[in-house]
Structure formats: structure tokens, C-alpha cells
Image (tube, grey):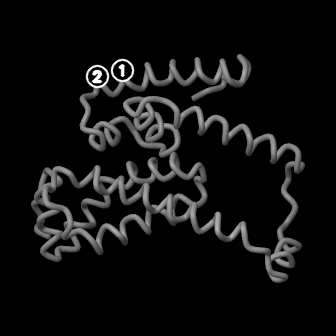
């Protein structure tokens, strides 16, 4: 790829389709926080998100020729990310239905004891799952900026570029989204939890 980096995804997609790995790497750089936030939101498992992101980009590279219009690259990429999460869910579901092997149960004995009690771990996990479920229930216009900011750790400029928003509209969406999230958390979990929302 030349030193003059294209300013839009369309040209990068076109170059990547011709085999320019540098163009694809630039697309990855521009969209990685968006994809990471989406898989965290879909899977509810930040620990597995990195694997899902890598799988998303691997699938995208393999089928990049399917993108007819570079302007549709980001929605196409997010649909791949969603499919990666669905496929992982299906694999996990199939594995749960099969009986655990003896090696699996022996491996559990090697897991170190956490610093929190099992009750605290369970309560924390359930709370995280409930908060993620509430976040997932928000309208997409609020869900994605909140996810990128508070789950993905993205700064305002990155989110603005990822979602194609002006600075003012992004700040408005984050503000209204936080208000909506806090109201839903308060309704579902009580006032003491909602007060500690991001």
C-alpha cells in the first residue's frame, strides 16, 4: 500500500480485493474496536471476544470478493461477526449436550481457587449477564456507542469515526444512552446498582 492512505473504506476494500494486504490491515485498524464491541455485546463474554474478532477478520479476508460496494463493508463485517458468535454458541451448545470426558473433569481439579468465594463469583457473573442483557435491549443507536465506549474502551474520536457521527451527535447519543441505561438498570436491579453505572 502506498504512503498515501485512502480516506474512505471503499478504496481500501477495492485495493484489498486486488490482494493488497496493507489495505486490509488498514481496514482492520479502522474497524477493530467496532467489531470487538459487537462480539462482546453478542457473546456477553469479553474473554472470548479476541478469538471471535480474529475469526471475523479471517472470514472477512477469505470472502472479501463478496463485497460489491465498499460503502457496505462495515455492515457486511458486522454480519460476519454476528455469525461467528452464533456459530460459537451452536458449538458450545452441542458440547454441553455431550457428556464430559474424564480428562475434562480431571482438568477441573487443576483450576486454582479464585480469590473470591464461589458465591461472590456467581453473583458477579449473574450481575454482569443482567447488565449486558439490559444493554442488548437498548435501541441500536444507543447500544453501539455505549458498547464501544464502555466495553471496548474506545475514545470519542474512534467511536465517531467508526460510526460516522459528528462529535455533537455522538455526545448526545452517549448522554441519552446512559440515561436510558441507568433508568433500565434502576428498574431491573434497584437504585443502588444503577447509581454505579458507567
Looking at the image, can residue 195 be seen?
Answer: no
Quadrant for residue 55, please give it.
bottom left
Q: Residue at x 79, y 75 (%)?
A: 100
Task: Determine crowd level at label 2: few under 14, some 14-19, many 20+ residues with C-alpha closer than 10 A.
Answer: few
1 and 2 marks in contact (CB < 8 Å): yes
Q: Residue at x 32, y 53 (%)?
A: 31
SS category of the residue bearing label 1:
helix
In the drawing, what numbered circle is on residue 48?
Answer: none
Q: Is residue 39 left or right of residue 124?
A: left
- Residue 16 at what x, y percent from top left? 18, 69
The quarter of the rendered structure image containing the N terminus is bottom left
SS category of the residue bearing label 2:
helix
In the drawing, what numbered circle is on residue 168?
Answer: 2
Q: Residue at x 13, y 51 (%)?
A: 7
In the drawing, what numbered circle is on residue 172?
Answer: 1
The quarter of the rendered structure image containing the C terminus is top right
Amino acid at each position: 500500500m502506498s504512503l498515501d492512505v485512502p480516506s474512505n473504506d471503499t478504496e481500501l476494500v477495492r485495493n484489498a480485493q486486488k490482494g493488497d494486504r496493507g489495505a486490509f490491515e488498514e481496514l482492520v485498524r479502522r474497524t477493530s474496536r467496532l467489531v470487538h464491541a459487537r462480539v462482546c455485546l453478542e457473546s456477553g463474554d469479553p474473554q472470548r471476544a479476541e478469538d471471535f474478532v480474529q475469526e471475523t477478520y479471517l472470514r472477512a479476508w477469505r470472502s472479501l470478493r463478496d463485497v460489491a460496494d465498499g460503502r457496505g463493508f462495515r455492515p457486511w463485517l458486522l454480519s460476519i461477526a454476528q455469525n461467528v458468535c452464533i456459530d460459537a454458541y451452536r458449538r458450545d451448545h452441542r458440547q454441553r449436550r455431550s457428556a464430559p470426558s474424564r480428562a475434562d473433569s480431571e482438568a477441573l481439579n487443576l483450576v486454582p481457587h479464585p480469590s473470591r468465594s464461589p458465591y461472590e463469583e456467581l453473583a458477579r457473573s449473574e450481575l454482569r449477564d443482567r447488565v449486558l442483557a439490559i444493554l442488548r435491549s437498548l435501541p441500536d443507536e444507543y447500544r453501539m456507542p455505549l458498547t464501544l465506549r464502555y466495553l471496548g474502551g474506545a475514545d470519542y474520536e474512534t467511536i465517531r469515526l467508526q460510526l460516522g457521527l459528528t462529535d455533537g451527535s455522538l455526545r448526545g447519543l452517549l448522554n441519552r444512552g446512559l440515561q436510558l441505561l441507568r433508568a433500565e438498570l434502576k428498574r431491573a436491579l434497584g437504585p443502588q446498582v444503577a447509581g454505579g453505572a458507567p
